[in-house]
Amino acid sequence: MAKGGKSLFSLSTLLASFFGAAMVAGAFAYFNYKFSEYKFIDFSQWIFYEKNDIFKPKEKKYIVVFYSSKEQGTMDKLAKVQLNIPVLAIDYYNQVRQNTKNTTFLRSGTKTSLDFIQRFNIYESPSIFFIKRSKDSLYKQDSMIRKLDNLDELSKQIKEL
């Protein structure tokens, strides 16, 4: 015992250590949970088309943009985007569009479109997120889904992520 009858290892030290450990464990559990929320997409199970051909992914990473071709100029802006990661542009209205160097325009059947929207909880258009290859044609979501307020700002926002 130290002078004055107080222990060096007091109750407040014990409680502070306990709460500190609890906060670290809570933060770890939260981030583990948030990461587990990320979804998978298997391109061998879900069929997407580029023009008339079935899409088969080749790259390790993609930027997925879910958009509406009914919004004026959207398809042209996506076709002209210059990024270092290829873009998969999935149209809500399934309009056929010629691919460009950096952008692959995809369309699908109604069931696949609805499954995609439901799987990734897409509520707004345009929305954007990243996917990366897990194995073969299986890709895992690699970022949160964000509302893209302005397609002109796409390259700026990608650099900030």
Image (cartoon, helix red, strand yellow):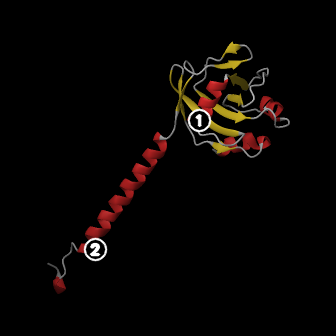
Counting residues from the start of the chain, the first of labels 1 and 2 encountered is 2
Residue drawn where x is 17% and y is 84% of the image: 3
Mark 2: amino acid: Ser
| Residue 11: numbered disc | none
Instruction: Kindly give the residue lying farthest to the front in the view shown.
Output: 111
User: Tag 1, which secondary structure?
Assistant: helix
| Rendered view: 156 above or below 104 | below
Q: Quadrant of the C terminus?
A: top right
Instruction: Tell me which corner region of the image, top left, top right, bottom left or bottom right, holds residue 145.
Output: top right
What type is the residue that disc 1 sits on?
Gln
Judging from the image, what secondary structure is the residue with disc 2 in? helix
Count of numbered circles on the image: 2
Q: In the figure, residue 109 lies in which quadrant?
A: top right
Q: In the shown orientation, is residue 62 left or right of residue 21?
A: right
**Residue that protrudes farthest toward the right in the picture:** 72
The residue drawn where x is 66% and y is 46% is 160
> Badge 2: how crowded within 10 Å, few (<14), some, or many (20+)?
few
Q: Are marks 1 and 2 in contact (CB under 8 Å)?
A: no
Instruction: Give the quarter of the image for residue 61.
Output: top right
**Residue 152 pos. (x, y %):** 80, 41
- Residue 122 drawn at (x, y percent): 63, 39
- Mark closer to the observer (1, 2): 1
As drawn, the residue found furthest toward the bottom would be: 4
Q: In this rendering, is residue 54 above or below 15?
A: above
Rendered residue at 49%/41% (across/down): 37
**Residue 118 image offset from top left, x and y in percent:** 59, 35
Look at mark 1 in the image and give the residue it sits on.
118
Viewer-proximal residue, 14 or 40? 40
* Image side of residue 93 versus residue 24, left or right: right
| Quadrant of the rendering where the N terminus is positioned | bottom left
Residue matched to label 2: 12
Q: Residue at x 66, y 31 (%)?
A: 85
